[in-house]
Image (cartoon, rainbow, N blue to C red):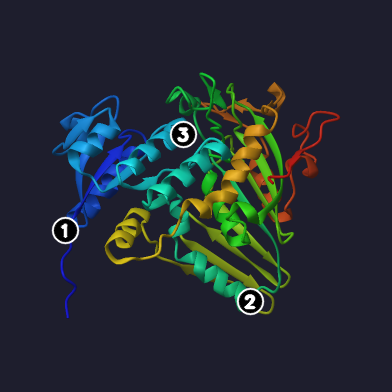
Amino acid sequence: MTTPPTTPLPLVLAGVRGHGRWHLENIRRLQARGLVRLAGLCDPHPLTAYEADGELPEQSADLDGLLASTGARIAVICTPIPTHTDLALTAARRGAHILLEKPPAPSYAEFRRMADGVAAAGVACQIGFQSLGSHALPAIRAMVAEGLIGRVTGIGGAGAWVREEGYFRRAPWAGRRRLDGADVVDGALTNPLAHAVATALALAGGGRAGEVARIETELLRANDIESDDTSCVRVTTADGLPVTVAATLCAERAGEPYVLVHGERGRITFWYKQDRVLLQRADHGPEEFEFARTDLLENLVAHLNAGAPLLVTPEDTGGFMKVVEAIRRAPDPVALPDTAWHRVPGEDRRAVPGVDALVARAAETLSLYSELDAPWARPAGARPKAVSPR
């Protein structure tokens, strides 16, 4: 028996440049499969046919009007962080289901306003943490449940990336903690390497807000920006499990970010961008696995058409948003001394010598930078910022 065909769901994309280009390509991939139909693009600066590399649908800078005129059933929102809540609520009021790019909001209060408003409107909302669609996550949970690495003692996360100084000038909100009086909270842990935090929390059983008990932050910067570019956070879950994630955008060499599950008799390393897993355990040789991934927009369509469970609901990201809130409330990032970084010859970027190894050690030992004796990690007399999220 064949499955009856479904009518492609009309969809609008808000935010067409930057990461929005990836969404546009993904939408066209699903359109070619007959799952969605791109009905509109929403951006203050419309795309040209040349930029779009194809036929253009209706365009408007007004999401509410575009949803009304197109009758779109889905809104994909990939706009500046401070706009997420209002645009998601605009879509919800129009009855459109939502794929909202991460981070979902710049503060916990804005997150709750969005999540509660979406729930009250009765529409589905998926948060764009693509790593949480990886089939590696249930596989890792199964390995842990089978006792392959013994009792889990902690989760580490590491991200050593490089970003040129132009990255922080790509948009008015880039590299900012606040803009025109509104929270932005752009930073290494809350935006480019947010997947490391969200994935670590998901594997630790700390994905929801009530599963987070304590948060410690250390925020630093080598670049001349307002937000952090080299930072670490340690979350203690309600079950007492430590989750430490260290990140930098000033690495000497770019590396693949990963999450590390520590066990009493082994460990599991998950390179989440590659959906690749390494299992190391006592009395066994190392075993490596590669997994598929479910696209989050495709999952949202399957949810609407066939009732498939959503993979990343707003409530599933409440723990991550508690981390965002702790970073928002923390003192502004400390500027590293000029002796702690250098300009990379031939590249428009700053690098911090030794930070690549330090990030890895933090994930390995579940330690903050200051506990690893990094000379620049903590000004004399200062202590890591710890907050209770409750």
User: In the figure, is residue 49 to the left or right of 344?
Assistant: left
Identify the element where label 1 is drawn. loop
Kindly tell me whether residue 127 is visible in this rendering: no
Mark 2 vs mark 3, CA separation in Å: 40 Å
User: Which disc is residue 81 wearing?
Assistant: 3
Q: Is residue 106 above or below residue 240?
A: above
The single residue placed furthest to the right in the displayed view is 381
Q: Residue type at mark 2?
A: Leu
Q: Residue type at mark 1?
A: Thr
User: In the figure, is residue 284 to the left or right of 129?
Assistant: right
Q: Residue type at mark 3?
A: Ile
The residue at the point 37 percent across, 61 percent down is: 294
Q: Are marks 2 and 3 in contact (CB under 8 Å)?
A: no
Mark 1 vs mark 2, CA separation in Å: 45 Å
Q: Label 2, on which residue?
A: 148
Identify the element where label 3 is drawn. helix
Look at discs 1 and 2 and give the one toward the viewer. Answer: 1
Q: Position of residue 78 (x, y in %)?
A: 37, 38
